[in-house]
Structures are given as structure tokens and as C-alpha cells.
Amino acid sequence: MRIRHRPLRRGHLVLATSVALVLSGCAEFDDTAASETAWHTPPELTAEQGPQPEGETPPPTGSERRQRDIPPPDGCTDHDPAVIATCLDTVTAVAAIAGTKVPTAIAGERRTGRVLRVERGKEPRVITELNVSAAGDGGLTGLALSPTYNEDQLVYAYITTAKDNRVVRFAPGQRPSPVLTGIPKGDTGNRGVLAPDNTGALLVATGDAGGRASASDSASLAGKVLRIDTSGNPAPGNPSPGSRVVATGLHAPGGVCTSADGSRTWVTDRADNADALYEVVPGEKLDTAAWSWRTKPGVAGCVDTGQGVTITTSIAGSLQFLPIDERGAVTGKPTVALDGEDGYGRLSGLSVLTESIAVAGTVNKDGGTPVSSDDRVVLLPIQPEGGGGGKD
């Protein structure tokens, strides 16, 4: 049963300030890509679980965090151990790199087009600077790693150019090359996001370029969830052979994510009257939300944890946990964390690092209230305290 209610704010639960403490300096995480299978018949896989470091310390509760009395940022120095990069500009997109000894990710700045490798304990290193048009909500808005990133170092990005929205790919020291071009561009509705699925294909959620009718037009690439191979062609197993389109009806997507076993795909979207989370059903229009927010918190990145869907918000500046059952149905109201003084301000992209921790970017320089160390890349918990949200 799909539920549509306003969220219930549950107070300050698990906070990310010392979530870095569960990531030991010697921890390594599996980054093995799954083999390709058809979209309709996902393989029988269990959720990826990287080995956890010995002697880990559980994340603190909200009250414990306040008792730690972490000093405020001092220039670009941030004393919060969950912060792994500082003094960036509007980090809309992130892609976590598993298999590293310390928390590491690729981060993208929406307005500058810079793509950086960020790693705890080191200065951010620029990989490339993409030529983007950041007018309105465009620019660099999505990142994803190649399924064989450890071998080829390829990164995929969703960008707005002077002519269109497109997907490009690049590796360190190489010029970016187009993968999928001609996605319609408008005064608004240019944001797009990327995520790998568990078959080696790439999911691309596109904005409607300001044209609401385009979202329903199957001939247009605007307002769609697309599924492509690493060369930009329609991926095998799509609903219509030869078509990249998996679902229609998007307006301004904030995030797209897939469960580890491939049985569920989710996309967040911002429409005129409400924000929404949709489960993507291949071949169908996105017209019945799994959950909607009339308060319009600015839904952004998402992660399917198996027990729920975790969502960042870039206006409310919170982390929201929606519980789901074994069938993927939402079973309760969202649990809200990391809001107000205990948060990091406006949050955007979200990418899984381990079974309990994700990497996120902040966008406080884009309409928020930045502190001296913004914008930042931070580590966040992806499960609420107690493991679920409130029941109706």
C-alpha cells in the first residue's frame, strides 16, 4: 500500500558528527561490479557489505553529540570528524569510492564544473574541470563511477552545456567524451542525476527542461528515467527494445537509486505542488508517489538500505528515513535527522560507502547559510537510531 502523508519530525536521532569513527584507517570495502542481467529479472544477490573495522565505535545519539562540544569550523579547518573535505563550491554530486583505506569520494561542483577526488586527511585534488552552463538549476548535477572503476578510473557526469543537457565520461588526464547528448535544455528543469544499477548499466534521471508536456512524451528524453549502457545505447532488458526510456513523468529529479539486489529502483522528484519519492516500475508513468511532501523540503539524493529509503533534502537541510517492508512498500512516516543546529545545512547528492554510511555533499552556498568551511563533503548515517521510522 502506498502512503502519502506529510512527514512526522521525530527529533534529533542518529547524527553524523562522529560517524567517521566507525571507519577505521585500515578498513577496506568491496567494489566489485555485478555482471549484466536483464532489467526485468534481477539476479539473486544479497546487499553488498564491506568488512567492518575491528573495535568500531557506534555513532552517537543526538544528546551524545551535543555533549562532545565539537568546536565550530575555523576557516577551512573543520573539527567535525565526519567532514572529509571543506571549502568547496556547491557540491551537488558525489560518488563514493569503495575499497580505499580511508573514506574517499569523487565530488562535483554544480556551478564551476570542477570534479575533485576528496579523501580524509588530504587536500581535495581536481580531476577535471567540465565546461558547464550553470544558469537556473543546470551545471554539473550528477556523478557515477564506471562499473569497472578500479581498472579504468572512468567517471560519468550529467552536465548542462550551452546547447543541451548530456552525459559525459572521463578519466584523470583525459578530455571528457560525450556518452549521451541532446537531452533538452530549458530555463529551468535542467537538473539530472546518475546512478549505476546492479547489472552494470547506468540509470539517468532527466529534468523536463521546463516543459511539463515533455515529461509524458515518450519521444523526448526530457522528464524521464533512462537506462543506458556505458556507451550511451539502450541497455539490454529495457521495457521497449531499442529505447533508453524506462519510465516517464519526471519534472526536477534530485536522486535515483537501486536496491543492492536490483529488485527496486527509486527516484526523487520536485513538482510544483509537492516533492515525491517514486518507485520506478519499468514501462510505466511515474504518477503515484510512494511518499509525497507537501512541505517541499527539496528532496535530493537517495539510498535504498534494504529496510528503508534514506533521502537528503537541499532546502530543509535534513536526512529523512522512510521505512519499507520486504515488498518495498512504505510502511510509516519519515524519521527526520540532522536538521537545525545538529545538521550540516543543505544536503544534496548521496552515495553509499558502507552498509551503514553514505557520502553526501552540501550546497549551502546555493541559497543556504554557509559556515567558513562550506561547502563540504560529509559522512552520514543511512539508518535511523533503532533501524526504522514511525508506524501509522
Image (cartoon, grey):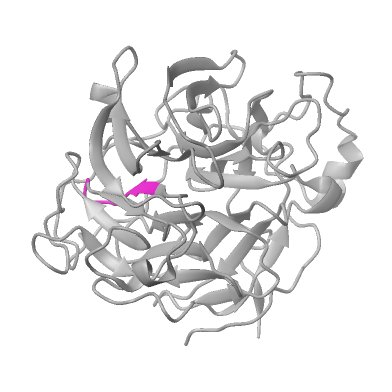
Is-magenta flag for residue 14? no
Where does the image place residue 250, in percent across and percent down from the top left?
Answer: 42, 66
Answer above or below: position of 71 versus 209: above
Left or right of 390 on screen, residue 289: left
Please tell me which residue lies in front, 109 or 30.
109
Query: Which quadrant of the structure image shows residue 4?
Result: bottom right
Left or right of 149 on screen, residue 235: left
At a point 39% along the width and 74% down the height, the residue shown is 286
Left or right of 25 on screen, residue 39: left
Where does the image place residue 75, in percent across and percent down from the top left?
Answer: 81, 18
Is-magenta flag for residue 198? yes
Answer above or below: position of 273 versus 136: below
- In the rendered image, the residue lying farthest to the left is 241
Residue stretch in magenta: 194-200
Please tell me which residue lies in front, 335 or 189.
189
Please tell me which residue lies in front, 372 or 168.
168
Answer above or below: position of 72 versus 231: above
Is residue 154 among what the camera can see?
Answer: no
Please tell me which residue lies in front, 246 or 14.
246
At a point 32% along the width and 12% down the height, the residue shown is 173
Where does the image place residue 26, in percent across and percent down from the top left?
Answer: 51, 22
Where does the image place residue 42, in percent across and percent down from the top left?
Answer: 21, 62
Is residue 58 among what the camera can see?
Answer: yes
Location of the C terminus by quadrant is bottom right
